[in-house]
Image (cartoon, helix red, strand yellow):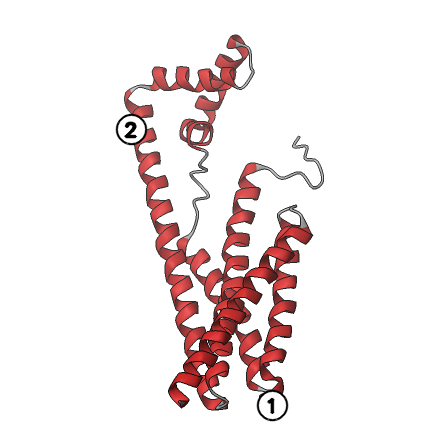
């Protein structure tokens, strides 16, 4: 009978959860901050709504594809590394099974089991599924649940797009005098939400995550707006 404790995270489920969390939250944060930075920067240089919208859309499309591509390449490399390690482990199990079982027993002995019990555990796990037992104990890999690069890529693409739409809509709808402030308010609200969600799901400090998110976003908008203003003044002059 399997017994679990409510709210307790185990390695396989926690790893999968953190992978999706990383791709989703980072994608949404990057979408909000990146698109807001470009849109506010252009708004500092010109009041032309079309120019701001074109720049924002271009930033949204390029950023979403870049995030998706980056996640795909990164996770593909991780998956290739995991598969290479599994191939080596499979080869070692075929060519030196006794040494591998002894190594597995030593791992469990280092984790606190008595030598006799560690040897018994290693033997039973090896008889049940040698590759899975050794991969999880030695490598921290589940052979049947490798990270998917496509899942990570799509998660980043969707998250970046959703995040980027927030500042894009906020700056393109209001009148000239309110568009930058409306964008700033929308961005801060979005970053508060993503910061709180990421902290809750990761059991981290909510206030610290929110302050970190909002601080980065506010600094980005301030710098890009000033650059836009200076560029607009220079070109206008």
Q: Residue 83 falls in which quadrant of the image?
A: top left
Q: Is residue 206 left or right of residue 35?
A: right
Q: Is residue 56 visible?
A: no
- Nearest the eye: 208 or 15: 208
Contact flag, marks 1 and 2 (Cβ < 8 Å) = no
Residue 98 higher or lower than 212, as above or below: above
Q: Is residue 40 left or right of residue 175?
A: left
Q: For the residue labelled by badge 1, is the local secondary structure a helix, a strand or a loop?
A: loop
Q: For the residue labelled by badge 2, is the local secondary structure a helix, a strand or a loop?
A: helix
Residue 70 higher or lower than 51, as above or below: above
Residue 152 higher or lower than 99, as above or below: below
Mark 1 — residue?
A: 175
Q: Is residue 211 left or right of residue 216?
A: right
Q: Quadrant of the N terminus?
A: top right
Q: Quick one: which residue is furthest to the top in this view?
A: 116
In three-dimensional space, the C-alpha distance between marks 1 and 2, rounded to whole angstroms, equals 67 Å
Q: Is residue 106 visible?
A: yes
């Amino acid at each position: 009978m399997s017994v679990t404790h409510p709210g307790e995270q185990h390695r396989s489920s926690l790893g999968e959860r953190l992978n999706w969390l990383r791709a989703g939250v980072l994608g949404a944060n990057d979408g909000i901050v990146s698109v807001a930075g470009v849109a506010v920067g252009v708004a500092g240089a010109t009041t032309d709504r079309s120019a701001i919208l074109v720049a924002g859309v271009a930033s949204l499309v390029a950023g979403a594809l870049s995030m998706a591509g980056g996640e795909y390449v990164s996770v593909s490399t991780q998956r290739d590394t995991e598969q290479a390690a599994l191939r080596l482990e499979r080869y070692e199990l075929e060519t030196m099974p006794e040494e591998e079982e002894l190594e597995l027993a030593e791992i469990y002995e280092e984790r606190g089991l008595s030598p006799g019990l560690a040897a018994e555990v290693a033997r039973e796990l090896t008889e049940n599924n040698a590759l899975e037992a050794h991969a999880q104990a030695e490598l921290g890999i589940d052979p049947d649940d490798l990270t998917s690069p496509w899942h990570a890529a799509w998660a980043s693409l969707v998250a970046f797009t959703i995040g980027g739409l927030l500042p894009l809509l906020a700056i393109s709808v209001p009148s000239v005098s309110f568009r930058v402030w409306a964008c700033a308010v929308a961005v801060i609200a979005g970053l508060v939400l993503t910061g709180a969600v990421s902290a809750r799901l990761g059991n981290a400090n909510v206030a610290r995550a929110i302050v970190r998110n909002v601080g980065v976003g506010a600094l980005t908008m301030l710098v890009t707006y000033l650059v836009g203003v200076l560029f607009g003044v220079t070109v206008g002059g």
